[in-house]
Image (cartoon, coloured by chain):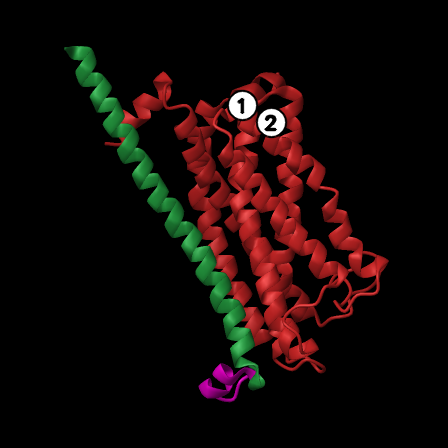
Amino acid sequence: MNWGSFSAFIHMGGYAFYVWSSFGVSFALLGMEIWLLSKRRRTLLKRLGQIQRLNASKGSR
Amino acid sequence: MSKVNLYKFSAPATFYGLAGQMIPGFAILSAILFAAGLYISFFVAPTDAQQGEAYRIIFIHVPAAWMSMFIYVVMAVYSGIGLAFNTRLSAMMAQALAPTGALFCFIALFTGSFWGKPMWGAWWVWDARLTSQLILFFLYIGFISLQAAIEDPKRADRAGALIALVGVINVPIIYFSVKWWNTLHQGASISFSKAPTMAHTMLAGMLVMAVACWTYTIAIALYRVRLIILERERHTTWASEILGGAK
């Protein structure tokens, strides 16, 4: 174990700003990619579903 | 008759289902590996004698940089296959990989900057490694915007494939830049010709994080390629069947 206490872990030997910014931003970006993609999927399914229902109702007339 | 199978799985309709089955496994694996990799990065790997704790940025920086280069090469291979055999799915795969490649490229540049500041005293320097990596980022952006700008998917695929293939020359330049030129950037973290110079736990942390990034990329690219397939094949019978069921 490297760290004597939780505050020592947070302090990162004086490099807290650089280390936590690097890891924080990296994982925030990966999370954002997942979120944006799932949003894109929901929108796409909704839009294509609407078009399909529209076509189906036209066809039955 | 392996040829038959290959054709079967290169059909977007078949691959849509196959990709859907593969995503959960890779996603779970990626989450486990990231957790293990972060644990090694912060709690197992010792403090660096020269750089103190700041060196821990390596555990995200190096895997991201590897991914950014590797994804570009894979993209170029898919693009080449697409151009040569006119297979739709390979162009879609290239398109699905590009945003994630650009993301890892950005992460490599960003974390590099946050590592450079405390170690070199500068956020950015115009040295060969950094500059060629920045060009890689622009190539990704170029690929994505070119494909988005062309209406006809077939022509968009071909234009994107050309930029991917021409740009791949940049990848060996990035990789060997630290050897060919005098750069501020340190040499390759892992050498295939020399014994490892870093502590085993440091090496292990980097490799676990790299595999975590790999599995993440596979899962997210498969997820994205399914959306691309659905968008492009929406007029086909199989796609409308799927959409009918997904109401």
Amino acid type assigned to the residue bearing label 1 in the image: Lys
- Give the colour in which the image draws chain B: red
**Horizontal and vertical percent for residue B91?**
56, 30
In magenta stretch: residue B232: no
User: Could you confirm whether marks 2 and 1 are on the same chain?
Assistant: yes
- Give the colour in which the image draws chain A: green
Q: In this view, does B72 lie to the left or right of B188?
A: left
Assign the N terminus of chain B to one quadrant of the image.
top right
Relative vertical location of residue B7 with respect to residue A23 in this rendering, above or below: above
Residue at 67% across, 55% down: B133
In magenta stretch: residue A6: yes
The quarter of the displayed image where residue B178 is located: bottom right
Relative vertical location of residue B102 with respect to residue B33 in this rendering, above or below: above
**Horizontal and vertical percent for residue A46?**
26, 35
Q: How many marks overall?
A: 2
Does residue B199 appear in the picture of this structure?
A: yes
Q: Which is nearer the eye, B183 or B218? A: B183
Residue pointed to by mark 2: B158
Q: Is residue B223 left or right of residue B244?
A: right
Assign the C terminus of chain B to one quadrant of the image.
top left
Relative vertical location of residue B73 with respect to residue B85 in this rendering, above or below: below
Residue pointed to by mark 1: B154
Q: Is residue B138 left or right of residue A27?
A: right
Residue at 62% across, 38% down: B75
* Label 2 packing within 10 angstroms: few (<14), some (14-19), many (20+): some
**Horizontal and vertical percent for residue B125?**
70, 67
Q: What stretch is highlighted in magenta?
A: A3-12
Amino acid type assigned to the residue bearing label 2 in the image: Arg
Check disc 2 and report its element: helix, strand or loop.
helix
